[in-house]
Image (tube, rainbow, N blue to C red):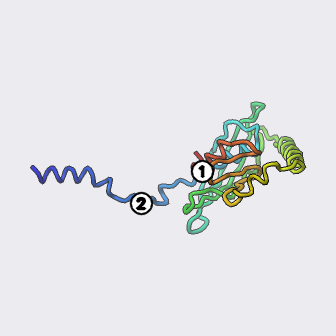
Amino acid sequence: MRVASFLAMGAILAPTFMPTVVTAQDRDPARACGTAIRYEVQDRYPQARGVRIIDSSSRDAGRSEVVVTGRGEFEDRNGGEARFGFSCTYNYRSERTYDLRVEDVSHKDGKNNGAAVAGLILGAIVLGAIVASSKDKDRERDDWRQDDVWSPADGVRCSARERSCHKNGRFSQKWTDRVFYRGG
């Protein structure tokens, strides 16, 4: 009876003492890149709603990297749909994505988003000029923390000490989740 009890307890407790090995197959580069590309599309095209990845394919790009390419679509603010192509590189070691590319954005009916892109670029230039001409009042206060502050994208600043990101001077939950909580 005692032997059976010890065997039963050992069978129950054995899985908790077994080390967990995470293999490359357990990590999903397509899913990580899909999330990163959705954020990238929404950052580049503020009119994008309901960004969806239609299809994707992966190919090895080295010992610890894979390149994911594919197509996606989104609804614009006028109710039309636009399609795009994308590529993304996923690193298994760091479990991070980089080299995000969104290309060939066009409406399903064949129209090009050139005017929207030109408007966004012009707006970014004007906003950049305004920001550059204004005096940075917080520079002296923030100098002591420069070693733990970085910028993963234009207009975005993240602080490792605070574990938060700010976009254009305002707190950004989307960037905080993306940088510190793996694309949450």
Pointer 2: what residue?
Answer: 21
Residue 128 on image: x %, y %: 86, 48
Q: Observer-nearest residue: 31 or 183?
A: 183
Q: Where residue 93 is drawn, which disc sits there?
A: none
The residue that appears at 67% across and 55% down in the rendered structure is 87
Task: Report the number of numbered marks.
Answer: 2
Mark with earlier residue (2, 1): 2
Judged left or right of residue 120, residue 171 is left
Q: Observer-nearest residue: 21 or 127?
A: 127
**Circle 1 — which element?**
helix
The residue that appears at 66% across and 46% down in the rendered structure is 175
The residue that appears at 68% across and 52% down in the rendered structure is 158
Judged left or right of residue 21, residue 67 is right
Q: CA distance from mark 2 to mark 1?
A: 23 Å
Quadrant in which residue 174 is drawn: top right
Query: Badge 1: few (under 14), some or many (20 or more) residues near its Cα, within 10 Å?
Result: some
The residue that appears at 61% across and 46% down in the rendered structure is 177
Residue 24 on image: x %, y %: 49, 60
Quadrant in which residue 106 is drawn: top right
Residue 141 on image: x %, y %: 75, 52
Q: Observer-nearest residue: 91 or 88?
A: 91
Pointer 1: what residue?
Answer: 180
Furthest-left residue in view?
Answer: 1
The amino acid pointed to by label 1 is Phe
The amino acid pointed to by label 2 is Val
In the image, residue 94 sits, relative to residue 154, either above or below, namely below
**Circle 2 — which element?**
loop
Query: Badge 2: few (under 14), some or many (20 or more) residues near its Cα, within 10 Å?
Result: few
Quadrant occupied by the C terminus: top right
